[in-house]
Amino acid sequence: MTEYFGLVIFIFLAAVVAGVFLALASLIGPKRHSAVKSEPFECGQAPFAPPSGRFHVHFYLIAILFILFDVELVFLYPWAVVCVELGAGGLATLTVFLGILMAGFYYALDNGALEWQ
Protein backbone atom coordinates (compact mmCIF):
# COMPACT_ATOMS: atom_id res chain seq x y z
CA MET A 1 0.00 0.00 0.00
CA THR A 2 2.91 2.34 0.58
CA GLU A 3 3.77 2.34 -3.13
CA TYR A 4 0.52 4.24 -3.79
CA PHE A 5 1.17 6.88 -1.15
CA GLY A 6 2.95 9.21 -3.58
CA LEU A 7 0.12 8.85 -6.08
CA VAL A 8 -2.49 9.70 -3.43
CA ILE A 9 -0.52 12.79 -2.39
CA PHE A 10 -0.20 13.87 -6.03
CA ILE A 11 -3.95 13.49 -6.66
CA PHE A 12 -4.75 15.36 -3.46
CA LEU A 13 -2.41 18.23 -4.33
CA ALA A 14 -3.79 18.42 -7.88
CA ALA A 15 -7.34 18.64 -6.50
CA VAL A 16 -6.33 21.34 -4.00
CA VAL A 17 -4.53 23.43 -6.64
CA ALA A 18 -7.47 23.12 -9.06
CA GLY A 19 -9.92 24.09 -6.32
CA VAL A 20 -7.83 27.09 -5.29
CA PHE A 21 -7.56 28.29 -8.91
CA LEU A 22 -11.31 27.94 -9.44
CA ALA A 23 -12.09 29.76 -6.21
CA LEU A 24 -9.68 32.59 -7.03
CA ALA A 25 -11.08 32.95 -10.53
CA SER A 26 -14.64 33.19 -9.27
CA LEU A 27 -13.75 35.61 -6.45
CA ILE A 28 -11.25 37.90 -8.16
CA GLY A 29 -12.29 37.67 -11.82
CA PRO A 30 -14.18 40.53 -13.46
CA LYS A 31 -17.94 40.12 -13.78
CA ARG A 32 -19.36 42.55 -16.33
CA HIS A 33 -22.58 41.10 -17.70
CA SER A 34 -24.21 42.73 -20.70
CA ALA A 35 -26.89 41.95 -23.26
CA VAL A 36 -24.27 41.52 -25.98
CA LYS A 37 -22.36 38.91 -23.97
CA SER A 38 -25.55 36.98 -23.29
CA GLU A 39 -26.41 36.56 -26.98
CA PRO A 40 -25.58 33.27 -28.71
CA PHE A 41 -22.87 33.32 -31.34
CA GLU A 42 -21.30 30.97 -33.86
CA CYS A 43 -17.55 31.38 -34.25
CA GLY A 44 -17.75 35.06 -33.40
CA GLN A 45 -20.59 35.70 -35.84
CA ALA A 46 -24.28 36.27 -35.21
CA PRO A 47 -26.24 33.04 -35.75
CA PHE A 48 -27.75 32.84 -39.23
CA ALA A 49 -30.51 30.39 -38.24
CA PRO A 50 -32.01 28.99 -35.06
CA PRO A 51 -30.74 25.58 -33.95
CA SER A 52 -32.25 22.82 -36.05
CA GLY A 53 -32.86 20.54 -33.09
CA ARG A 54 -32.27 16.88 -33.81
CA PHE A 55 -29.84 14.80 -35.79
CA HIS A 56 -30.94 11.69 -37.60
CA VAL A 57 -30.51 8.59 -35.46
CA HIS A 58 -28.25 7.08 -38.12
CA PHE A 59 -25.64 9.73 -37.29
CA TYR A 60 -25.49 8.48 -33.69
CA LEU A 61 -25.29 4.86 -34.84
CA ILE A 62 -22.29 5.61 -37.04
CA ALA A 63 -20.63 7.51 -34.18
CA ILE A 64 -21.18 4.65 -31.72
CA LEU A 65 -19.86 2.08 -34.20
CA PHE A 66 -16.79 4.23 -34.87
CA ILE A 67 -16.04 4.52 -31.16
CA LEU A 68 -16.65 0.81 -30.65
CA PHE A 69 -14.29 -0.33 -33.38
CA ASP A 70 -11.75 2.38 -32.56
CA VAL A 71 -11.57 1.25 -28.94
CA GLU A 72 -11.29 -2.36 -30.03
CA LEU A 73 -8.26 -1.47 -32.13
CA VAL A 74 -6.66 0.20 -29.12
CA PHE A 75 -6.67 -3.21 -27.45
CA LEU A 76 -4.57 -4.61 -30.29
CA TYR A 77 -1.58 -2.37 -29.56
CA PRO A 78 -0.61 -3.96 -26.21
CA TRP A 79 -0.95 -7.39 -27.80
CA ALA A 80 1.36 -6.36 -30.64
CA VAL A 81 3.96 -5.21 -28.12
CA VAL A 82 4.09 -8.57 -26.30
CA CYS A 83 3.04 -10.92 -29.11
CA VAL A 84 6.32 -12.87 -29.09
CA GLU A 85 6.14 -13.50 -25.34
CA LEU A 86 2.53 -14.70 -25.49
CA GLY A 87 3.22 -17.51 -27.92
CA ALA A 88 0.49 -19.73 -29.36
CA GLY A 89 -1.94 -19.05 -26.53
CA GLY A 90 -1.77 -15.33 -27.18
CA LEU A 91 -2.29 -15.89 -30.90
CA ALA A 92 -5.34 -18.06 -30.19
CA THR A 93 -6.75 -15.40 -27.87
CA LEU A 94 -6.18 -12.72 -30.50
CA THR A 95 -7.86 -14.87 -33.13
CA VAL A 96 -10.95 -15.27 -30.94
CA PHE A 97 -10.95 -11.52 -30.19
CA LEU A 98 -10.70 -10.58 -33.85
CA GLY A 99 -13.31 -13.20 -34.76
CA ILE A 100 -15.82 -11.64 -32.36
CA LEU A 101 -14.89 -8.18 -33.63
CA MET A 102 -15.38 -9.21 -37.26
CA ALA A 103 -18.68 -10.92 -36.43
CA GLY A 104 -19.93 -7.65 -34.95
CA PHE A 105 -18.65 -5.72 -37.96
CA TYR A 106 -20.34 -8.14 -40.35
CA TYR A 107 -23.59 -7.90 -38.35
CA ALA A 108 -23.52 -4.08 -38.57
CA LEU A 109 -22.68 -4.23 -42.27
CA ASP A 110 -25.41 -6.82 -42.97
CA ASN A 111 -28.07 -4.76 -41.20
CA GLY A 112 -27.18 -1.65 -43.22
CA ALA A 113 -25.79 0.30 -40.28
CA LEU A 114 -22.87 1.57 -42.34
CA GLU A 115 -24.91 2.69 -45.36
CA TRP A 116 -25.61 6.40 -45.51
CA GLN A 117 -28.79 7.39 -47.33
Image: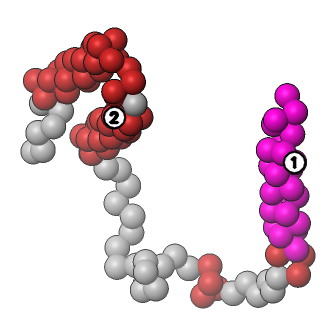
- Give the amino acid at mark 1: Ile
The quadrant holding residue 77 is top left
The quadrant holding residue 15 is bottom right
Q: Where does the image place residue 46, in percent across and percent down from the top left?
A: 43, 84
- Picture quarter with the N terminus: top right
Q: Which residue is mark 1?
A: 9
Give the CA distance from mark 1 to mark 2. 34 Å
Q: Was residue 17 drawn as part of the magenta stretch in this picture?
A: yes
Q: Is residue 54 left or right of residue 36?
A: left
Q: Earlier in the sequence, mark 1 or mark 2?
A: 1
Residue 75 in view here: no
Residue for point 82% across, 67% down: 22
Q: Where does the image place residue 104, in percent across and percent down from the top left?
A: 23, 22
Q: Label 2: state its secondary structure.
A: helix
Q: Is residue 102 left or right of residue 94?
A: left
Q: Was residue 74 drawn as part of the magenta stretch in this picture?
A: no
Q: How is the image coloured?
A: secondary structure
Which span of residues is magenta-colored?
Answer: 1-24
Category of crowding for the residue at label 2, using alpha-carbon neighbours closer than 10 angstroms: few (below 14), some (14–19), many (at least 20): few
Q: Which residue is mark 2?
A: 80
Q: Where does the image place residue 40, in percent across and percent down from the top left?
A: 52, 76
